[in-house]
Amino acid sequence: MKKLFIVAIIALLGITQTEAQVTFKPGLRGGVNFSHFTQGDAYTSYTYDGNGNYVSTTNNNDDFKAKTDLYVGFYGALHLTKYYTLQPEINYSRQGSYVESRDGNVVTRTKFDVSYLSIGILNKFTFTDKFNFHVGPTLDFVVDKTRFVNNNSDDFFLFSESNDVDLTLTAGFGYNFTNNFGLEARVKKGFISVYDFNNSNPKNVVFQLGATYTFDIK
């Protein structure tokens, strides 16, 4: 009975110590987005030849260029073990792409602005006190979408043939200079087409570079 009592005490102390390692700390993140759309599928367009006929043409002449913008967000770091942290996040991310469409010698340059409210759950693996790797899914909801024709033109309008949600996978690395301040680099890949046009289905690709600040909660 005495030995059983000692084992129970040791086990209780172990559980208490493990629970004491669980901490929760909120934080802020923000930085720069470098976003673009994937090439998408070839699509068919029809042009009138002036003789009462429509001629079909298979097009794959769209060239997607990177667009620079920003992101800001809030996270809660639930530190479960020495090496693993569960990190829910809510972010506002301004994304999009430049698109150059060629028709012979004529090039039309269009800018797509798409802003998302992103909700994600990141799994953060800490290798040392400084470096970490994080990966997880996010669900992005469109809050604004605008298309600007020829970039500098005032000709802009909402593109209605689009999807209002995106399912993405995020992965990246972080480096902590202190217990509060760190830098991170991420890539986010979307799996749902941004807009639907003649069966062309471009998807989001975003590179993020920014800083994080974690608050001390006693």
Image: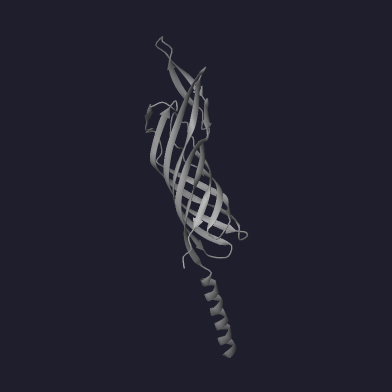
Q: In this view, does 198 lie to the left or right of 15?
A: left
Measuring from the top left, give residue 69's x and y in whole percent: 48, 39
Q: Which of 69 and 36 is in front in this view?
A: 69
Q: Residue at x 47, y 26 (%)?
A: 109
Residue at the bottom extreme, as displayed: 2
Q: Which residue is drawn at 58% across and 90% down?
A: 2
Check the image and report above or below for 13 versus 210: below
Check the image and report above or below for 163 versus 90: above
Measuring from the top left, give residue 21's x and y in whole percent: 53, 69
Measuring from the top left, give residue 74's x and y in whole percent: 44, 53
Evaluate whether residue 31 shows in this view: yes
Q: Nearer the viewer, residue 16 or 194?
A: 16
Quadrant where the image shows the N terminus: bottom right
Quarter of image, res 166: top left
Check the image and report above or below for 185 versus 10: above
Check the image and report above or below for 73 versus 98: below
Quarter of image, res 132: bottom right
Q: Residue at x 55, y 87 (%)?
A: 5
Residue at the top extreme, as displayed: 51
Evaluate whether residue 60 shows in this view: no
Q: How many labels does the image show?
A: 0
Measuring from the top left, give residue 189's x and y in whole percent: 52, 43
